[in-house]
Image (cartoon, rainbow, N blue to C red):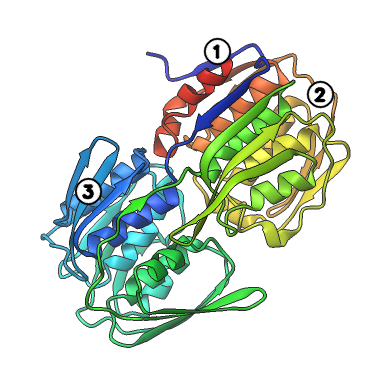
Amino acid sequence: MTKNIQIKNTIKSFNKIIKIEGDKSISIRWALLASQASGKSISENLLKSEDVISTLTCLKKLGVKVKFFRNKCEIIGVGVNGFKYKKDMILNLGNSGTLGRLITGLLIHSKEKIKLVGDKSLSKRDFLRVTKPLKKFGANFKTKSGKLPIIIDGTNKPKPVKYFENKGSAQIKSSIMLAALNTKGQTTIKAKKSRNHSELLFKHLNLPIEIKKKRNFDIIKINGVKKIKSLNYKIPSDISSSAFFIVLTALSINSKLKIVNVNINPSRDGVIKILKMMGVKIYFSNLRNYKGEKIADIHVESTKSLKAINCPSNLNSSAIDEFLIIFLIAAKAKGVSYFKDLSELNHKESPRLKWGSKILNLMGIKTITTSNSIKIFGNPSLRVKKQIIIKDYLKDHRVFMTSVIAALTFGGNWVIQDKDSIKTSFPNFLKILNKLRN
């Protein structure tokens, strides 16, 4: 069976209602916190992607019981610092940076040395960003150039720390937060604004967390705990995955789409704000609150007139996973769009800023790219009439899905390799897409 996909025709108009799979960020965080809880935790709509399966596989190796039944996942927690460690243990993180960086925070008190490994893509990514603050707790890390494989030598008495997280990375912040749960005393994090799923889960669990919100930073204080209560959770749909279908609809002809039960957390809704600024027709219905998260049904319509923008960089952290697909809107907009302070994009599964520019250039769109910015010279009349081959992108699922949306909306004869890349985050992407095409 071929692992490539070929697209020769643009999508026809559609008017559909779809449901997207569970939020990946919450799925992984739920599993990690459930592993530290006392008793049984159950989730509904847990994302069954490779990244989440890698999370559950690692937890099972650490002595956590995991069971699936129907649309639910059950985890029997081992309690705080309850992992069972074996000599020469190896944990395979697969492709998941979220898993790798967050679980490292729970492993700083390991009683045996643990080796962390990952796939080719993850092994190119920076782990110094978490090992540096976690060393302050007392753990030791052996690594070459701050990348996988990493050997963790834990500490029996992790101590609370003070740390300034200035990258706007929720993974770094969450790793420190999880490590802080197993200390005696108070850990203080001055954190640049980033997604706040971990904070909301901590609050829902009544964990000892205090948050003071400043203009550009949050001051987060966490005390160690001896016990965490179990956590039942209905996981909402992922806004990052939804973004591909929002842009598909906006760039299609005479089309409408409703996506139900989507997490529109304000620390994640940057893509909505940016697309609205560019003229995309989006609105919400059925707004509600669930365990601190904002949930809504998202409605989007085809948009004929799109506007170029100078994107405010204060929206970057809340849209960091969606910029590749946002760039497609800029390609169709009238004028020159400018996106800056995006160096964090190159710390993802692939150097996404470079790939965003490359895809647009292959389509015939002029760009000017630096190490942390991109100017996109939009062309509202663009129609691709040549063959485009997308390959060698480190199997980055977002490069694959962005290329598919570009092919279906701008035309051309596209050959996109490594379709299995979507299994890491959105295994049903093509299945849902086929519902819109039929």
Quadrant location, the N terminus: top left
In front: mark 1 or mark 2? 1
Q: Are marks 1 and 2 in contact (CB under 8 Å)?
A: no
Category of crowding for the residue at label 3, using alpha-carbon neighbours closer than 10 angstroms: few (below 14), some (14–19), many (at least 20): some
Q: Residue 438 — which label?
A: 1
Label 2 neighbour load within 10 Å: few <14, some 14-19, many 20+: some
Q: Nearer the viewer, residue 110 or 259?
A: 259
In the rendered structure, the answer to whether residue 397 lies left or right of residue 110 reads right
Q: Is residue 258 above or below residue 150?
A: above
Residue located at (19% from left, 48% from top): 66
Q: Is residue 417 above or below residue 346?
A: above
Give the amino acid at mark 1. Asn
Q: CA distance from mark 2 to mark 3?
A: 49 Å
Q: Nearer the viewer, mark 2 or mark 3?
A: 3
Q: Position of residue 62 (x, y in %)?
A: 17, 57
Q: Is residue 425 at all visible to an observer of this figure?
A: yes
Which residue is the site of mark 3? 74
Q: How many marks?
A: 3
* Image mark for residue 409: none
At horizontal 27% and vertical 62% (from top left) the residue drawn is 151
In the image, residue 103 above or below residue 187 = above
Nearer to me, 126 or 204: 204
Residue that sits furthest to the bottom in the current view: 185
The residue pinned by badge 2 equals 382
Q: Secondary structure at mark 2?
A: loop
Q: CA distance from mark 1 to mark 2?
A: 25 Å
Q: Position of residue 258 (x, y in %)?
A: 59, 33
Q: Label 1 vs label 3: CA separation?
A: 36 Å
Who comes first in sequence, dot 2 or dot 3?
Answer: 3
Q: Going from the N terminus, do you reach mark 1 or mark 3 first?
A: 3
Task: Say which label, 1 or 2, has the lower sequence index.
Answer: 2
Residue 330 found in image quarter: top right
